[in-house]
Amino acid sequence: MSLLNLYNNLNTFLVIGALLFGIGIYGIVTRRTLIGMLIAAELILAGASVNFMAFNRFTSPDPVIGQVFTLFIMAVAAAEAAIGLSIIIAVYRQFKSIDAEDTVQLKG
Amino acid sequence: MNPSIVTSPNLFSVDGLVGVVFLIMVAITIIGGLIACNSERLVRSVAGLIVCFVGVAGLYYFLNSPFVAMMQILIYVGAVAVTISFAIMLAAPEEQKRVGPSGPLVGPLGFATAALLTGGFSILAIRTDWKVMDKINDGSIKTIGIHLLTEYSMVFELISIVLLIAILGALVIARDGRES
C-alpha cells in the first residue's frame, strides 16, 4: 500500500472520519463559548458523513443510500445550526455573554 | 480489496497526481478542523470550519459523488458558515474576557478523550474485515433523484417540514426580547 493510492482504500476514509470526530469532541470539551461548541458539533457531523460516504462507496450494494443519508444529515445540520444560533442570540440578549459558564441563574 | 491497486503508481503519472491531490485534500480537512477547534477568535474558527468543509467536499468527490460534494459546498460553506458568522457578529462580544479552557485539567482531559476515541475507532475500522458487495446501480445523480422521489419521498417531505419548522422556530426564538 503506497501513499499515493490511499484514496482507493476504505480504511483511509474511516480514519479521516474518526479524526474529524475526535477533533470535534476535543472542541466541544475545551471550548468556552457556545458558538465554538456549535462549530465543533458541525465537525462531528462532518466526520459521521464521511463515514457514511466511505461505506457507501466501498461496501454498500446500493451506492445511493449513503448519498441520500448524507444529504439528510446536511439538512438536519442546517436546521440544528439555525435553531442553535437563534438560541445563542437569545441567550446573549439575556446574559450579555455567550460564555457557557456565565449563563447560569442558579449558581450556589 | 482490489488486487490491481497493490502496485504503486508513479508520482508523475495521472494516478500519482490524483493521489497527491487526495493527500492535499486530507491535509486541508485536518488542518481546517484543527484551526476550527483551536483558534482563539471565533471568526478565525469559522474560517477554519469553511476550509475543513471544502476539504471534506474534495473527499466526497474522491468517493464518486460529485453531487454530494457540490451540496456540501452549497449548504455548509454557503449557508451554515454564513449563518454562524452572522451569529458571531450579532452575539459575540468584541473581546473575550477569558480565552482558553476553563480549568487546568480541561485541555489534557479533552485531548485524552479525543485521542482515545479517534484511536479506538481507527483500530476498530482497520482490524475489521469489511465485506464488499456487488453494486446494483451506479449511484449517479439521476439515480439519486429517482430514489429521492420514489423510495425516500416520505423522508424527503418530512425533512422539508423539519427545515420549515426550524426556520420558523429560529425566527420566533431570536425575535423574543428584541424591543428592549
Image: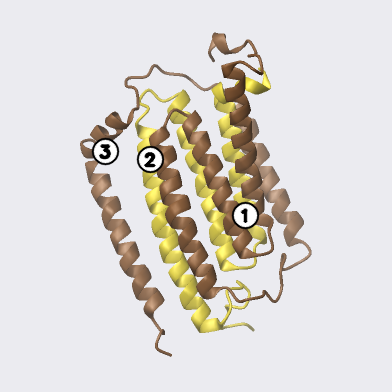
Residue type at mark 1? Ala
In depth, the one of B29 and A55 nearer the eye is: B29
Disc 2 is placed on an element classified as helix
Q: Which residue is located at x 65 percent, y 13 percent?
A: B8
Q: Are marks 1 and 2 on the same chain?
A: no
Question: Mark 1 falls within which chain?
Answer: B
Q: Which residue is located at x 46 percent, y 36 percent?
A: A52
**Residue at the bottom extreme, as displayed:** B180
- CA separation, marks 1 and 2? 25 Å
Residue B5, quarter of the rendered image: top right
Q: Is residue A83 above or below residue A8?
A: below
Q: Is residue B113 left or right of residue B14?
A: right
Q: Quadrant of the N terminus of chain B?
A: top right
The residue at which mark 3 appears reads as B148
Expressed as whole percent of the image width and height from the top left, the position of residue A53 reads: 46, 34
Q: Is residue A65 above or below residue B11?
A: below
Residue type at mark 3? Leu
Q: Colour of chain B?
A: brown
Expressed as whole percent of the image width and height from the top left, the position of residue B105 reads: 77, 61
Badge number at residue B36: 1
Residue density around tag 1, few if under 14, some if 14–19, many if 20 or more, within 10 Å: many
Q: Is residue B70 left or right of residue B14?
A: left
Residue B68, quarter of the rendered image: top left
Which chain appears yellow?
A: A
Badge number at residue A69: 2
- CA separation, marks 3 and 2? 10 Å
Residue type at mark 2? Phe
Q: Which residue is located at x 38 percent, y 40 percent?
A: A69
